[in-house]
Amino acid sequence: MTPSQIPIIQTIGACQEYKLPRTSLFGDRPVLAALKNVDFYAMEGESVGIVGESGAGKSTLTRILVGMEKPSSGSFKFKNQEVWSSDDEFKHEFRRSVQMVLQNPRSSFDPRMTIAQSLLQPLKGLKIGGDHQKRIHEVLDQVGLGVDSLKKYPYEFSGGQLQRVAIARALIPNPKVLIADEPVSALDVSIQAQVLNLLNDLVKDLNLTLILITHDLSVVSYVTTRVAIMVDGEIAEVDSPKSLFQNPKSMIAKSFVDSVLTVGKGIEGESLF
Amino acid sequence: MSEVLNVAKVKAKRTRKKSRLPLIIGGTITGVMILIGIISVFWIPMDVNVSDPSIRMLPIGTAHHLFGTDYLGRDVSSMLMTGIRTSIIIGSCAAFLALFIGTILGMLAASISKLDEPIMRMADIFMAMPGIIFALVLASTIGAGYLTTIFALTSFFTPAFVRVTRASSMRVLSEDYISVARLYGRGRMFITFRHVLPNISSILIVQFTIYFAAGVLSEAGLSFLGVGINRPSVSLGMMLHEAVEQIGITDPLNVWPGLCIVILVIGLNLLGDGLRDHFDPRFSQRVR
Amino acid sequence: MENFALKVENLVVALDDLTAVRGVSFTIRKGERWGLVGESGAGKSLTALAIMGLLQEGWKTSGAVWHDGINLLQASDKTLSSRRGRTMSMVFQDPTTALNPVAKVGKQITWILRHHMHVSKSEAYAQSLVLLNKMNLPRPESIMDSYPHQLSGGQRQRIMIAMALACYPELIIADEPTTALDVTVQKQVLRLLDAAVTERNCGLLLITHDLPVIAAMCENVAVMYGGRIVEAGAIAEVFTNPRHPYTRGLLASQPTLDNIDLDGGTRLPSIRGAVPPLYAMPEGCAFADRCDFATSKCKELPELDGHTHRVACWNPLTSSVKGA
């Protein structure tokens, strides 16, 4: 494969198991298989979606992709190199290159720190040099927030604005991959559009790889070009949003497509007006 | 129902200005009491342990003896001042030590899962011991006094602090910004002291005032029973203990120390409430 | 005898000096289905709670809510209790917290039947089984014998709907009934609610921020913003020819699947700005600072105007602009 054909981030045969609390005094503890043999990848500059219900395994896959958890078996590669068995320098590069935005912006920030302090955290923790203040100003500009945000505390922001700050924070280390876990689920619909547009713009302007995790199929169709549908810890189907809608193959894809309601269509899909 | 919560929190934020009263009243009372205690270190009208039968049982309002004297001729106002000082010292020391030990143990239990069970079970053991019996045992082995009382009270209060700290720490540790900090390579120490501790500090401060008050009350109880402070030290509880022997002879003697205890405890409780209201909406996670 | 299931007249809901609902009026005739749509902070949940008399301590209401011959806002607890669950019932958003966790499901359903309809234990049990069957719940006997935590979210929500329907109410108020459910289960539950409401010919007040759900379930809609209704009318009218700029913006910002020709990276129209916080609500129209059509007149509060398609706006959009 030529370098441009190697995925920037991927899992091969990844499995994840969690030990559950004891149910009997002797014998092994029961095991929950959260991920079963998952092959997932994203190319550089691509926007990929991961769709699934709660319990499907998307959060587990997300934690593996961002390096929070090590898969119990299988491989996890960044730039075609195993992450967990690499040297410290590579691990460090990985940490800076893969960043995450979470669902609940309120929970993503220490309520006792100003935005300025929160934005300094990646710079300090990941030991990034250079002009910190300049970098902070740059990312705020990229997400369309003013410098007056720096002195404020999280509680002074609305949900949508705080999510922008979260995106700004994720951009600070100049990442190559941005993983957004349900980034708009906690926001009002008219604000969702603002944040989705922002993500689209950033992907274009910065050549970011975006991995968007959500349970909302219509959101995914606006931002991504390829979608993986998960159920029961496995990837059931991968396709472009368009093909997925016109021709869902797996059961779960069918029920997802079926569950989407749009204004103008009734419950049985009949045209309303 | 989030909008209901939102509005309630916003309301709390705005009415903060209106109901600062508990904070002000509580703060003032506590402040005055502490001041009295401080003054008593440098000056009291009369030595509390010198008995002078010639001036015994003087009523309140007598010249030089504002609150009168007891049946041995000791000046009541001096005893009150000293007693307040003792109660404050014991209450605050016990609360502070319990806070210190409890916070460390609680944060450890919350962040290191292997330590969680052992620490909590130890806390359970200490909670299961009846405080008075423990104080009695200590009094009979080490002897009653300042240190014994503080020791007894600290071991009595610490488990509560461990629980509160552990619960709040766990809540903080489950927040997303902790995961984010870990992803930025922050170690346990940083997360504990720069993220967890500031976010539980308001709860701890309130707890401190509560146990300060509890310390004052408990000391009074222990000394009343004779296993706390004894002469030559003077405490409000000890005064109550002596007042028992003087019922029928000089009745009002039990009123003044009792009143002091009540005022001090009310002051501390109001202060605690006021502080809690002050901290709550501003840094609560759920505001807006 | 009135011919409406619910008539709300100038409902105001406030907490001290913060007014969250500022004068809401609408009528639901028997068998009609109304959607109350709005984003967070619009006041829709509080409106529902005020109607049901479920507001927490400290909240004050004014205006009138007419139902079954009485003004619910001024009714005694006893009068309210006799209506709640019987002539008017509610389906809440979170089925986990809406059901009593320490009582078996059967007990919770039969209690309603016995309390309101005064039937015997065995009769109540039988009716409960019928209800659960209608909700497409398999093995209703074992469900009656289960605790809520032993059932899935979808099952719990269906039980809540069954409980809401038990006494053939005139009106069901459903507050975000499917928001907390898994996406694949939502449609099923909506279908059930739809069928049940049709069969019993009850009125339905469906409260949600989810526009497609309202479009699928209701014939009429009231759009709320900043504590007031800004547009109301038949959905076929309002959603195809929205006259209030907020309604139009809301409809336009829904990600639809009709445009998935474009492979990712399209701009989704959004409404700039954010909802003003309750303690900083502007004097006039609350939407003015986010509105592309605002004029100086908008500093004055517009009233709901019109006949069947009402709008509260000084510069309503003309019908040539399509929304959906």
Image (cartoon, helix red, strand yellow):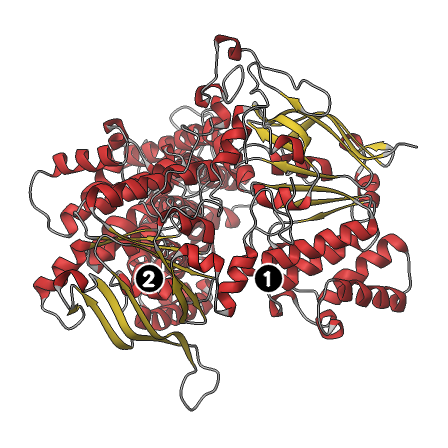
Picture quadrant where residue B206 is located? top left
**Quarter of the figure with the N terminus of chain A:** bottom left
For label 2, the residue is A62
Picture quadrant where residue A70 is located? bottom left
Residue extending furthest top?
C296
Above or below for A261 versus C254: below
Q: Is residue B152 visible?
A: yes
Q: Is residue B94 visible?
A: no
| Residue at 29% in and 56% down | B179
Query: Is A247 left, or right, of C215 in this rendering?
Result: left
Q: CA distance from mark 1 to mark 2?
A: 24 Å
Instruction: Looking at the picture, tell me which residue is in the foreground, C207 or C254.
Output: C254
**Quarter of the figure with the C terminus of chain A:** top right
For label 1, the residue is C153
Instruction: Looking at the picture, tell me which residue is in the foreground, C236 or B102.
Output: C236
Q: Position of residue B8 (x, y in %)?
A: 53, 35
Query: Is A63 left, or right, of B24 in this rendering?
Result: left
The tally of labels here is: 2
Q: Position of residue B101 (x, y in %)?
A: 29, 58
Instruction: Looking at the picture, tell me which residue is in the foreground, B123 or B69.
Output: B123
Q: Secondary structure at mark 2?
A: helix
| Residue at 54% in and 26% down | C321
Instruction: Looking at the picture, tell me which residue is in the foreground, A146 or C84.
Output: A146
Q: Chain of mark 2?
A: A
Picture quadrant where residue B38 is located? top left
Q: Position of residue A177 (x, y in %)?
A: 23, 54
Amino acid beneath label 2 = Thr
**Which label number is shown at residue B35?**
none
Amino acid beneath label 1 = Gly
